[in-house]
Image: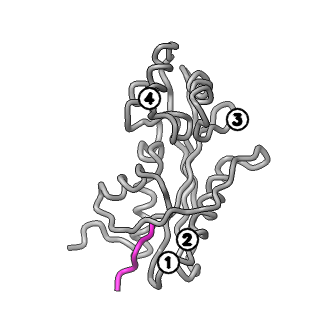
Amino acid sequence: MKNKLILASASPRRKHLLENIGVKFRVIEPTGEQEYRGDVKPDIFVKRNAKIKANSVISQANENEFILSADTIVVINDSVLGKPVDQYDAQKMLKLLSGQIHKVITGYAITSQDQKVFYSDAITTLVKFKKLNQSEIEGYISTGEPFDKAGAYAIQGIGSFMIHSISGSYTNVVGLPVARVVNNLQKLNVINLFDK
């Protein structure tokens, strides 16, 4: 019997990325996410957070199920940007990113229901913003799009107008490095994309 997949994420974007390529899974929203603290390297932090999310749903998994979880942060000049708490926070983040190159780091974890298998990695993509003027910042915030996004923007949404260039995985910026994750899931025989 083929192994089954649980996506431990509340993110509609991660769900959409997997659905887009035909991966079958069920969603269980995780608990226990941690806020970033400056004493941990960002790539270690996102991997740790992904593991916490995976472990929070493991008791709800069935035999032969694997759990996939992820955590995404934006890093600029050694500052870590999570999701903005309000419009002022979003404005501060967008001003900081304006005209600059920043890192988007997504950590992910894959674990089996019996926890005999555990895999974790963190992928970094470089993103360059165009120089934003105040009316662009205020207009974008007024759309409501920034508020559940790390760094206060969505590369796949209206926020695409701000993106000058990227270096690395596009889907990583959306919230899941799809090529890397799919490769891992196929090696574990959790999925086979083109199995009839």
Task: Tell me the residue that label 2 is attached to.
Answer: 57
Going 46% across and 17% down the picture, which residue do you hit? Answer: 136
Q: Nearer the viewer, residue 73 or 166?
A: 73
User: Mark number for residue 164?
Assistant: none
- Is label 2 or label 4 in front? 2
> Residue 79: x and y, percent?
69, 35
Tell me which amino acid carries mark 4.
Answer: Ser
Mark 4 nearby-residue class (10 Å; few <14, some 14–19, many ≥20): few
- Is label 1 or label 3 in front? 1
What is the spatial separation of the Cα atoms under label 4 and label 1, in whole angstroms? Answer: 40 Å
Does 54 appear above or below 142?
A: below
- Is label 3 or label 4 in front? 3
Q: Quadrant of residue 144?
A: top left
Task: Tell me the residue that label 4 is attached to.
Answer: 165
What is the spatial separation of the Cα atoms under label 2 and label 4, in whole angstroms? Answer: 36 Å
Looking at the rendered structure, the secondary structure element under dot 4 is strand
Does 185 appear above or below 181?
A: below
What is the spatial separation of the Cα atoms under label 1 and label 3, in whole angstroms? Answer: 37 Å
User: Which residues make up the magenta segment?
Assistant: 1-6
> Residue 52: x and y, percent?
63, 64
Task: Tell me the residue that label 3 is attached to.
Answer: 78
Q: Are marks 2 and 4 in contact (CB under 8 Å)?
A: no
Looking at the rendered structure, the secondary structure element under dot 3 is loop
Q: Of label 4 and label 1, which has the lower sequence position?
A: 1
User: Mark number for residue 61?
Assistant: 1
> Residue 59: x and y, percent?
56, 78
